[in-house]
Amino acid sequence: MRRKLYGAALAAVLVATSACGSGFDDNGSATTQQSAGPADLKIMIASSGDAETKAVQDAAAAWATSSGSKATVTPAQDIVQQLGQALAGSTPPDVFYVDAARFADYASVGALEPYGESFAGVDAFLPNLRQSFTYDGKLYCIPKDTSTLALQINTDLWAKAGLTDADIPTTWEQLRSSAEKLKAKGITPLAIGDTRDRVGAFLVQAGGYWVSADGKQATGDTPQNVEALTYVQGLLKDGLAKYPKAMDAGWAGEAFGKGKAAMAIEGNWIKGALKADFPNIKYTVKELPAGPKGKGTLSFTQCWGVAAKSQFKQQAVAFVQAMTSADQQLSFSKAFGVMPSRQDAQATYQKDNPDDAAFVAGAQYAQGPVNAPKMDSVLADLDSGLQGLQNGSPATVLQRFDKNAKTALGG
Amino acid sequence: MKGIRGNEQPAGWLFVAPAVLILGLFMLLPILMALWVSLTRWNGQGSPFTGDVPFAGLDNYTRLFTDEGLTRQDFMTSIRNNAYYVFFVVPIQTVLALGLALIVNNRLLKGKGFFRTAFYFPSVTSSVAISVVFLFMFANGGAINAILSVFGIQGPQWFSDPRGLLHLLFEKLGVSPFLTDSGVFGLSWWDWLSGPSVAMCAIISLVVWTTSGTFMVMFLAALQNVPVQLEEAGMIDGANRWQRLRHIILPQLRPTLFLVITLGLIGTWQVFDQIYVMSQGNPAKTTLTPAFLSYRTAFRDFDYGSGAAISFVLFLIIVVLTLIQRRVTRERD
């Protein structure tokens, strides 16, 4: 009886496997059938909100009408997971957002079509953004927009502490002295996120960074990086800077918006967030203070990835071309406040948004995210080191990062 | 097999066929597929069931235990966190559930229905909703710290405090860190002995609060099956309240106790949604658990093989612990 039961179970499994088998057929990535003419493009975006979804949908509809194709835009809830599932099922969307921080993961497994090299007008895009989407010397995809970190200053708190425009910090020393003045008046001076994506800006200002420019080597434990982390640690220890969690905020922008900190280091997105949640706050945006090696900031960007397994690569690239034209980028930036990734569009953008001068200026010298595959858990580990920076040792945090990164990078 | 009922067998198979098919298709088959994935270096591109997918053998498993590196360190940290979590949650929730059941089973209690509903209520509320409410309660200026400050205690920054309870205790006693140079599985003994972090304690209290209601109902059902005569006989023999509980009621509850502890063990080793909503493994990985690590490894790092391997090791841990627990609580005649 027992044996029969096993037999039946096995049979059920076999039946089920064969039934499923057809669904998992792999067409072979290299030889995806290409179709010319009108296409049925599927586009997946990680939307920042309704405004972005609608703007992209409208732009896609306009492109579809003029090209005679169909374009369906789907906003993803969790694009990493949804893309992961779609790629595993060999049915990825034709075009999708790829975040610079995750780009190398997709490029290294061959999920992306490297269309960037032959993209018409590729030189118009900011060089450091193009670098963010280059893997193994090949430009894979075209940056759709960018944002950079800058220093936000709450002008009311600033005046309350008796500070003037002359106190607006342009160097590390000034940042410290202005912060001390604020602290003396009982105001928390600076809110800074406890991740590599904020603290990393200080590394750039000190002339270092987590990894080498080609993303192939870990360069954590250098004198420059130690100097930068020691400086940040000093701010934290003396209560001159606080992580958002210590102020009951989810991120620095929230602490800043609630008036719990006089300064914050955040990117372009803080504009929209403050307008929506804290409309009454008065603030100004300045470039980040320069460190021993000059100015430095971090850039964040996403690109229009085209799936290597798309049936409509040609049309997909044409779609990206339409989405990244200077006019289209400017209309996107009007709709949901992102900064264009094209140099020619940035000039117009700055004219239209004089308050964003600091962000635009930062885009010229910004450093992109760590651009190497398999680094997510290493970077998460680094973040937990940074969370404990106040009582930890900067050198230990950096050495630990180097050790883990070397294993991940295979160097 | 021939006889008066000999021809009933095909009919029997026919009747269980839907269940066998559904279980096979939605449970057994995915489990076997995951087992296969855990033996490969599949990167999430296309099907894992083709010849192109590199076969890794037991590499994904050995990396968790023998190879020095971040993978092992993360995994062992998650095991440590979860072990402390289980160690605190299971006994506390079992005792609390039993206590609540004894209270609402009291024949003299007024408003029984109200209390039963109140105690059970957390269990029927969505865990995500409760997690969010607890996030507010444990915020730095939240309700918990406000209550603590009434007693003159300065509450910790709950969700950003990675210090372990045992480490804090050692610090209080003036014991400096010891055994930091030696250890097993990539963590020093000192790290193993950290105790649950302050952040983990907040999650522990949440889980105890939500699940004890469910287990209270189980205890309550068992308590109502204990014949009143037994307790009355005890009273006649002069047993006091505690003796009646210890020698009459508890032995009657043994099967339920077994059930509650088993369910508790399994549920606590699988903790995921509270972690996902409340802390994502932060601060400093002290709320990282194997279930969450498995998810993160597979879906964030695209290391599906390693992620699947973690979940199978977790499965083995649960099976082994349940077997041990069964042996320990077995009735000894």
Image (cartoon, coloured by chain):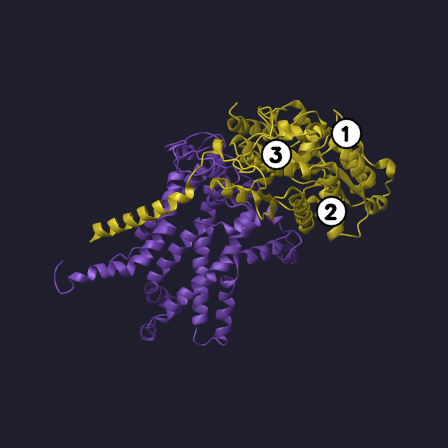
Residue at mark 3: A392
| Residue at figure coordinates x 50%, y 35% from the top left | A33
User: What amino acid does circle 1 point to?
Assistant: Ala
Alpha-carbon neighbours of circle 2 within 10 Å: few (<14), some, or many (≥20)?
some
Q: Earlier in the sequence, mark 3 or mark 1?
A: 1
Drawn colour of chain B? purple
Residue B248, how many percent across, how many down?
33, 67
Chain that the image shows in yellow: A
Question: Do marks 3 and 2 share a subunit?
Answer: yes
Q: Chain of mark 2?
A: A
The vertical placement of B59 against B86, above or below, is: above
**Image position of A3 (left or right of A102):** left
Q: Which mark is residue A290?
A: 1
Horizontal side, residue A286 vs residue B80: left or right: right
Quadrant hosting residue A122: top right
Q: Pointer 3 indicates a residue of which chain?
A: A
Amino acid type at image mark 3:
Gly
The percent position of residue B324, horizontal first and vertical second, equals: 33, 48
Indicate which label's residue lies in the foreground, 3 or 2: 2
All told, the count of numbered labels is 3
Q: Which mark is residue A335?
A: 2
- State the SS at label 2: helix
Category of crowding for the residue at label 1, using alpha-carbon neighbours closer than 10 angstroms: few (below 14), some (14–19), many (at least 20): many
Residue density around tag 3, few if under 14, some if 14–19, many if 20 or more, within 10 Å: few
Q: Earlier in the sequence, mark 3 or mark 2?
A: 2
